[in-house]
Image (spheres, grey):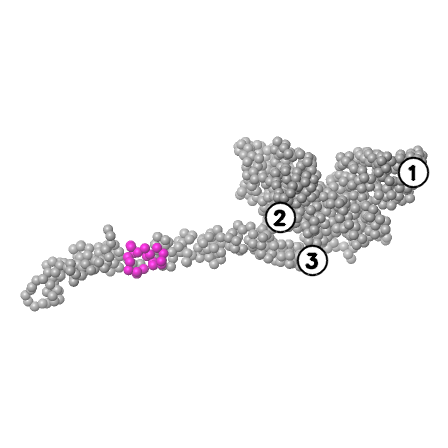
């Protein structure tokens, strides 16, 4: 029923209205009261007008309004009824003259009741978080636990703190301060002005003129032990020099090959040479005192082969002008010119006599045919220890007990084999003969000259191949049903790629240590581009030439083909191999010793059965990462795998067994970086203990080779590892011990100290020169440890 306006009701009841019923009667006698009731209870007599007026009964309940305490019969007594004559209204909350039942804004706050969470509260109309508190008085409108005054957006429960105003809450923002450095790499992720702060002093390293990691008040640049607060110098009195170990170093295979090529212009097949002994971390060493019988036979056979080839060139084709048309000239040329090149020094009187014998004795020659004597002399020279070994013995220093200084010829050999991987050239031998390899300035001139040679490019590539063990890929075998194009040509390109990555960072101006790991440019030849089905803009790349191409997914050592391929199974990637390799070769962190007090046989059987069972249960639809974590779940395995190896290798699962980027495994399961148990933090890909391998509380989470490369590029541990590898490669031994397989003598404290100080100096010199890789090698060549030697007694 439609409501009648209150005004209309009043008007219809006015006594003066034309609709009123007026009854006129005459009465005798004088008037008394102004009104007088008749027998009709709803009629009254107006004594002044002497008329009968019918009284109003709004609710028609037979009780006139004047006597009725609820005129409109709405159940609300008139005294409490704002609208006593309107049965449809009784209240007017906002006193706006409109009854509450018909008022669409009860509290008159301009918000319609249908939109007002608090229609009877003029101060509230919204409740964003539905907590019963109006937003105007709610201290935490979005109920995110952050007070409005501290909340960057009080109406977004997912956005409470946004330091860099990028629209991402700080809890999920991977760069909270918006400085372009991911939080995991940022020394202070809440301060855009601090990105790298090695000593945690609140000053970014780029403007910190006193970096002191171990807080011993000695700046790292002057601190021989920057991570040891108990020691800051080499502790040698009066700046005493450091001494290296006297040693004889058998030529490594590449050194032998290069030497024969440079001296005699003869090519030697590496397969004819003995295998090189290997230091830990793949670095090769010739640091041994003898040659066994089988290897000696190989050297004799090689000497015969080389001699035959050279003799033919000298006596038949006349390609070598040794003056051998006459015996005396041939002898003179051999002893005065060729033999010093082979022995890498001047020839003494006894040696002159010994080799003259081969030419002068009629048993070997005739005056007109010195060929037989020449060949015997050359075979003898090539099998002599003076050729096969590099001598780093030195001559005694006057008035010094057990102290020696390398001769200038020994120094020439050291420099040449260190920086070019071959025998000294004429300029070095002349400098040695003229005693011009004794001062730092003289040595530096030769180092810089040698680093400009083509041989230096090859030698630094050799270092990279040894460090990264990339030659292993040449012998890698894969499932050809899965990888049909994985042939010897591809393997050779993978090995060469590692060398090219290092050479580009080492020799190119303005390249730094970071370019080994953090770069968007991959070193590729056409063979690898085709193998990975990768395309690049621009001209085609030669099969024989490597170039820098914009392929971030294949850039840097962590995404290099040889590393990923050789540290994998024949058909699938290997979390454990890759994780272990990074620890040992990129961070120089020794893995814990394999447990010898536990019988792992039964444990492996149990885990193998679990793997078999779950594989059947899932019908093979299970990721290799899942299977790996099942294999390593026993407590006996956790010491190495829980944080040290498995999470690290897991982060490279986006590359298959031949280093190709992928989104899914061969069985179609998507690659992720969570292992298989998302509730276990150790199943997330991460680098734990970047500085201390046993640290479990400082994980750096990452996904993929690119992000890991970013981490290692900025890692001081990785930088120190590079200098340690350079030390091993150059000196042929480790820092703390000789450390090549089969010979593990531990050095004396003095020797350890000397080696450590030199390695640290290599690092600081590199850092002083904008992290240029070559300065670590240069500094080592200038070190006392090279020029000065002593005989240390090893501690077994």
> Range of the magenta residues?
94-112
Of circles 1 and 3, the one toward us is 1
**Residue hosting label 1:** 326
Camera-side residue of 117 and 62: 117
The answer for how far apart the CA atoms under marks 1 and 3 are is: 69 Å
Q: Nearer the viewer, mark 3 or mark 2?
A: 2
For marks 1 and 3, the one nearer the N-term is 3
- Residue at mark 2 to residue at mark 1: CA–CA distance: 66 Å
Q: Is residue 217 left or right of residue 264?
A: left
In percent of width and height, residue 763 lies at 70, 51
Q: Secondary structure at mark 1?
A: loop
Q: List the residue tagged with mark 2.
A: 710
Ranked by sequence position, the earlier of labels 3 and 2 is: 3
Q: At which x and y percent is residue 699?
A: 59, 47
Indicate yes or no whether the magenta region holds residue 750.
Answer: no
Q: Quadrant of residue 21?
A: bottom left
For label 2, the SS is helix
Q: Is residue 621 left or right of residue 217?
A: left
| Left or right, residue 629 beside residue 400 | left
Q: Residues within 10 Å of mark 1 (few under 14, many from 20)?
A: some
Mark 2 or mark 1: whose residue is earlier in sequence:
1
Question: Which residue: 68% across, 42% down?
Answer: 546
- Residue 107 included in the magenta stretch of the image: yes
Element under label 3?
A: loop
CA neighbours of label 2 inside 10 A, class few (<14), some (14 to 19), many (20+): many
Report the residue at 91% width, 44% height from top: 349
> Which mark, by number, is residue 395?
none
From the top left corner, tell me how far across and down residue 504 is, in percent.
69, 46
Give the camera-side residue of 525 and 595. 525
Q: Residue at x 66, y 47 (%)?
A: 516
Judging by the rendered image, the residue that carries numbered circle 3 is 218
């Amino acid at each position: 029923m439609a409501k009648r306006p209150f005004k209309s009701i009043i008007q219809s009841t006015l006594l003066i209205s034309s609709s009123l019923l007026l009854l006129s009667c005459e009465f005798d006698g004088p008037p008394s009261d102004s009104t007088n009731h008749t027998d009709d209870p709803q009629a009254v007599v107006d004594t002044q007008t002497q008329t009968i007026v019918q009284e109003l009964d709004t609710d028609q309940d037979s009780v006139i309004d004047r006597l009725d305490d609820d005129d409109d019969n709405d159940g609300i007594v008139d005294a409490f009824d704002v609208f006593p004559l309107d049965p449809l209204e009784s209240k007017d909350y906002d006193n706006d003259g409109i009854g509450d039942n018909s008022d669409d804004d009860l509290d008159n706050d301009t918000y319609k009741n249908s939109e007002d969470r608090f229609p009877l509260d003029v101060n509230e109309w919204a409740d964003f978080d539905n907590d019963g508190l109006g937003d105007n008085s709610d201290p935490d409108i979005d109920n995110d636990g952050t007070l409005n005054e501290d909340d960057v957006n009080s109406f977004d429960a997912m956005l409470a703190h946004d330091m860099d105003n990028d629209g991402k809450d700080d809890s999920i923002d991977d760069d909270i301060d918006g400085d372009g450095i991911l939080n995991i790499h940022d020394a202070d992720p809440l301060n855009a002005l601090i990105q790298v702060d090695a000593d945690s002093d609140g000053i970014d390293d780029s403007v910190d003129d006193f970096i002191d990691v171990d807080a011993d008040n000695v700046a790292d640049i002057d601190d021989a032990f920057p991570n040891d607060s108990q020691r800051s110098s080499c502790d040698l009195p009066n700046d005493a020099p450091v001494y290296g170990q006297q040693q004889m170093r058998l030529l490594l295979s590449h050194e032998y090959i290069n030497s024969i090529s440079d001296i005699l212009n003869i090519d030697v097949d590496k397969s004819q040479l003995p295998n090189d002994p290997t230091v830990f971390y793949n670095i090769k060493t010739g640091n041994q005192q003898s040659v066994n019988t089988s290897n000696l036979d190989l050297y004799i056979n090689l000497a015969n082969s080389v001699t035959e080839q050279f003799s033919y060139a000298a006596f038949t084709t006349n390609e070598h002008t040794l003056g051998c048309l006459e015996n005396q000239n041939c002898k003179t040329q051999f002893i005065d010119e060729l033999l010093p090149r082979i022995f890498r020094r001047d020839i003494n009187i006894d040696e002159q006599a010994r080799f003259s014998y081969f030419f002068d004795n009629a048993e070997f020659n005739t005056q007109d045919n010195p060929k037989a004597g020449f060949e015997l002399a050359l075979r003898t020279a090539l099998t002599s220890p003076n050729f096969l070994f590099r001598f780093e013995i030195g001559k005694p220093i006057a008035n010094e007990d057990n102290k020696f200084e390398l001769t200038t010829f020994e120094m020439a050999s050291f420099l040449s084999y260190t920086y070019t991987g071959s025998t000294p050239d004429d300029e070095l031998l002349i400098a040695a003969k003229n005693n011009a390899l004794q001062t730092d300035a003289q040595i530096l001139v030769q180092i810089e000259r040698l680093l400009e040679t083509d041989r230096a490019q090859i030698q630094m590539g050799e270092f990279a191949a040894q460090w990264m063990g990339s030659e292993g890929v040449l012998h890698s075998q894969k499932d050809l049903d899965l990888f049909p194009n994985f042939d010897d040509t591809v393997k050779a390109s993978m090995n060469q790629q590692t060398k090219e990555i290092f050479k580009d960072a080492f020799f190119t101006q303005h390249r730094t240590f970071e370019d080994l790991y953090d770069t968007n440019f991959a070193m590729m030849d056409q063979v690898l581009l085709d193998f990975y089905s990768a395309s690049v803009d621009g001209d085609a790349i030669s099969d024989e030439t490597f170039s820098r191409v914009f392929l971030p997914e294949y850039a840097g050592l962590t995404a290099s083909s040889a590393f990923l391929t050789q540290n994998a199974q024949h058909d699938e990637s290997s979390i454990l191999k890759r994780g272990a390799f990074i620890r040992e070769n990129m961070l120089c962190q020794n893995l814990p010793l394999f447990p010898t007090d536990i019988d792992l046989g039964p444990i492996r059987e149990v885990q193998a059965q679990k793997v078999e069972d779950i594989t059947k249960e899932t019908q093979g639809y299970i990721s290799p990462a899942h299977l790996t974590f099942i294999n390593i779940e026993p407590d006996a395995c956790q010491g190495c795998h829980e944080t040290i190896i498995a999470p690290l290798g897991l982060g490279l699962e986006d590359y298959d067994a031949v280093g190709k980027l992928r989104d899914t495994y061969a069985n179609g399961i998507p690659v992720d970086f969570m292992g298989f148990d998302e509730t276990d933090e150790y199943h997330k890909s991460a680098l734990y203990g970047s500085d201390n391998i046993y640290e479990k509380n400082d994980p750096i989470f990452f996904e993929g080779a690119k992000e890991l490369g970013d981490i290692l590029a900025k890692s001081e541990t990785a930088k120190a590892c590079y200098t340690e590898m350079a030390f091993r490669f150059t000196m042929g031994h480790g820092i703390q011990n000789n450390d090549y397989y089969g010979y593990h003598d531990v050095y004396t404290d003095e020797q350890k100290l000397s080696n450590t100080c030199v390695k640290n100096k290599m690092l600081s010199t590199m850092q002083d020169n904008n992290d240029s890789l070559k300065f670590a090698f240069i500094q080592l060549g200038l070190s006392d440890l090279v020029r000065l030697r002593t005989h240390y007694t090893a501690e077994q």
